[in-house]
Image (cartoon, rainbow, N blue to C red):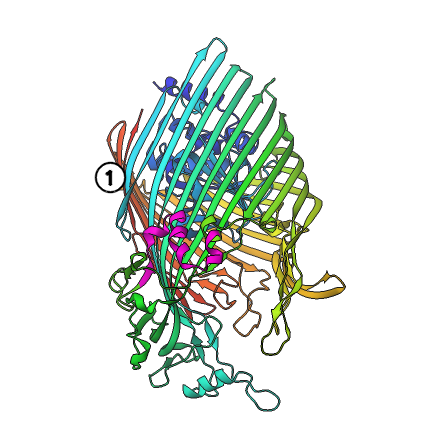
Amino acid sequence: MKRLVAARRLRRLQLATGASAVAVLIGMATPVFAQATSSTPVGTPTQATDAAAQSATVSPSGDQGVADQQAGSGVPDDDIVVTGVRASLQSAQNIKRNADQIVDSIVAEDIGKLPDRNVAEALQRVTGVQIQRSYGEGSSVAIRGLSQVRIEINGRDIFTASGGRSLSLEDVPSELLAGVDVYKNPSAELIEGGIGGLINLRTRKPFDFDGFKLSASGGVNYYDLYGVSKPQANLLVSDRWNTGIGEIGVLVDVAFQQTAFRQDQISSQPFYLLNEARNADGTFVNPVDAATAAGLGRTGKPTYLSHGVGIGEYLGDRRRLGVDVALQWKPTDTLQFTGEYIRSDYNFRYADYSYFAYTGDNPITPDFTKPFTYDEDGNFRSGTFVNVPTNANTSLETRHSVTSDYSLNAKWTPSDRLTINGDFQYIRGTTDGQRSIVILGSTAESLFLATGDGVPTMLISPDTNAANGNGLTTDPANYASGAGYLDHIEHSVGTEYAGRLDAKYTFDGFLKSISAGLRYTDRSAVTDSSTYAYYGLTRPLASSLYELRPFRGEVYRGYQGVPDGAIFFDRNIVLDYDATRAALAPYVDPSQTQALLNGVGYQPSDRNTQSEKTYTAYGVARFGTSDFAVPFDGNIGLRVVKTKVGTSGFESRSPQVQTGVDATTGQPIFGNGPVSFVPISVNSDYTKFLPSVNLTFHLTDKLQLRLAGSKALTRPDFTQLNPNVSINEFVATGGQRVATSGNANLKPLTATQFDASLEYYFSRTGSLYAAGFYKKVDGFIANITGPESYSFGNNTYTYQVTRPVNGDNGKIKGFEIGANSFFDFLPGWLSGFGTQANFTFVDSKAPSPGATDTSGNRLLVPLEQLSKYSYNLIGFYDRGPLSARAAYNWRSKYVVTTAGNGSGNLPIFNAARGQLDASVTYTVAPHFALTVDGTNLTNTTNRTYYGIASRPQSYVLNDRRISVIARLTY
């Protein structure tokens, strides 16, 4: 039996297509992580090192089985095959010890079994990784403080068609994946593109299995805030055969997920300082603010008033359909072909109820007869305001993204020293998006607002003047004016052809191997994004189009400090884009009726067209010796990449024309004339040299020191390169000539980065590590406003144009510490317990020219999306048929944006937050298991604030999700 196990292990290793130990070792279930930096200890197996080095050269294969997961550890295993969480932890530790680059990996115990079934949420367990959530679900990641992260699949490019460059992690069903690798300081053979790091998503191949393999799972997910359940399912079938033309394998993997979400939000509007400054002649700069301060009894005291409050209730759903079809053919022992088709089909939709009482930048009027309270710094805490405009909005937002990835790889090993790989890929992605908002206007006659001590309070009541009506928020008669409709659509198409050729030759002696390769890509991205078309509603709607939405006792898990409810346009109609426009058509001006029925369209200046070609060459030398006083090994390499960028768009121009005559003064009235579109075309190119080095010093059999350095780049997003600009000659009296555009001449960000890691391994599943890192980033992109000249006929004007530019440099530094172990020293069933813990500190100094207070004073803030502190605490149990895990993730406060939309240009911070997730799996029979898992078990409130914690912005609650999944595997 032992020989059979060993023979099977050897056979799998021989058949894997350029698979790394990272690739060979990983399936997806209860994740544990491996942080690795450079090279294999001298004299130990090199499968992990050699294969990890090729992860960007060929499709890395995952899930080689439990026995293979132990390969490359350098520790005799006596053919003992471990399973479950323990196998995952052991595999992760082997990767950490042996990988060629600095790489963290998520390792799992079974096919399609990942408690963090969202990819981003799985990544948050990795040391140094922080995630952003969108409507309760992980959506994007940052590595060591930088969100400029490259995402690839099987070592190749992948993207969601949009104005960006990367794949949205929301799009991919995690059940398709065999593993996820996070490269923090990549070596020269890995594809450039992420100064933060590189995330490689790996799928399975038929040669990963001995023969026939079947895995099927089905489950249901319950979302407690929304009160609905949604299904999910996954089916994998794989087999391989010996034929007259060689060995052939076929794998088909299909994953389907439906999810739902509800997000409740109560927000206060920005805090504005009452301006009591005086002009030189003694008059007030802002008489209204001065009068407000006097009425409040706050003359001469700093006073910050919130300009309103709002409620948001977002109800939506997601649908993911993923398909992976792989074909492998090995005609001889030295030649192997792998073809693969991967398709991701993602649908996102929500329709919300948003109710706001606010004045925007305009002053808000206090009721001076009612009491007001403030904190010691003059920040508003509670009070009553009068005649505050309200909006009751029902909106729809959708996104449908489809990405198809076709690839073909050939691997030839003409000798035991030479390996040649050829790889071709074609990607096509499309995205269609839509956003529409139906607005109903009213007035809050008397608004009581309390903020700063927990969830904001928003109470609306009628005033004492009966002529103003009953003042009820639930009466449709109070929504007779100020209504309108906003309409916006988007469409993106992206394609790419990519080809590469790589070769590796191995040696005996100090020089272990030399690798070299060439790569070419041809990518295009076309995005159409319409303006927001506005249609005013000229009369009240029919009663059948209204909907009463209750708030008090219903929103925010039964919160009482809100109005009884409000009147909205019927959400059931809003869910149908065409039906919404048809229902509103009778209520707009007749001149707009047909345009509304047709829907908003695209102008030439709505299109952003980008083309990009890259030409790349690299070389890597690997070396090592045990003859030195301290044995060491490593690699040194250089990657050279030339990028050619072609950008095209339009300058939209409207001359000033006379539109009429003032009936009173007889003076001409001017406005904008017909629009013309002038083509813009910009070509640019740049060449970058990206060196890298990795060293490992083996201080003892259990203790090793790793050092690494490299240079990386991130190219600008296509949205930032967009050259389109709109210039109008006519400007209303007192107005400014302003415009906004992209910058086709942007250069990439580059980072010089260094890492050091000390690692101690005290058992098969026990280790301690501490790592430090430093990054110097050049050319941060920031939006800057500056003067530009444009001419109409003989008249030349100066416009203040806001564009992204390469600006100042920044520095990011920090450290990571972590440990993991099973408690094998405990007796009996207690030995099934184990734990993982890690902590990350990241400090940044980077430019943020857009961050200002409400008076326009520049603020110094950290990098967006960066928490200075974060940690993970994970406890698990694995013994016999029972496997369980509880994982708590925490991160400190961070900047959401330096200038938030609707925030009065204030930076918005997210307060510290922590969340507990857990799962339990019971193996009922050898081929059948049941899993119950839950996310957000702590019912965590997500809180944001304007600059300082005493000026709250929003309190947000999301669903707790409970899932039950049955899994069958043969």
Q: Amino acid at mark 1?
A: Trp
Q: Which residues are magenta?
A: 567-594
Residue at the image point whose x is 53% and y is 45% from the top: 162
Q: Residue furthest right?
A: 794
Secondary structure of residue under mark 1: helix
Residue at the disc numbered 1? 829
Q: What is the x, y in percent for residue 625?
A: 60, 33
**In this view of the protein, which residue sits in the foreground, 959 or 482?**
482
**In this view of the protein, which residue sits in the foreground, 321 or 513?**
321
Q: In the image, is residue 736 above or below residue 521?
A: below
Q: Is residue 490 visible?
A: yes
**In this view of the protein, which residue sits in the foreground, 724 or 722?**
724
Judged left or right of residue 747, residue 946 is left
Q: What is the x, y in percent for residue 752?
A: 63, 50
Quadrant in which residue 849 is drawn: bottom right
Q: What is the x, y in percent for residue 628?
A: 61, 37
Q: Report if residue 408 lies within the magenta region.
A: no
Residue at the image point whose x is 27% and y is 40% from the top: 220
Q: Report if residue 593 lies within the magenta region.
A: yes
- Badge 1 density bin: few <14, some 14–19, many ≥20, Cα 10 Å: few
Residue at the image point whose x is 56% and y is 89% from the top: 283
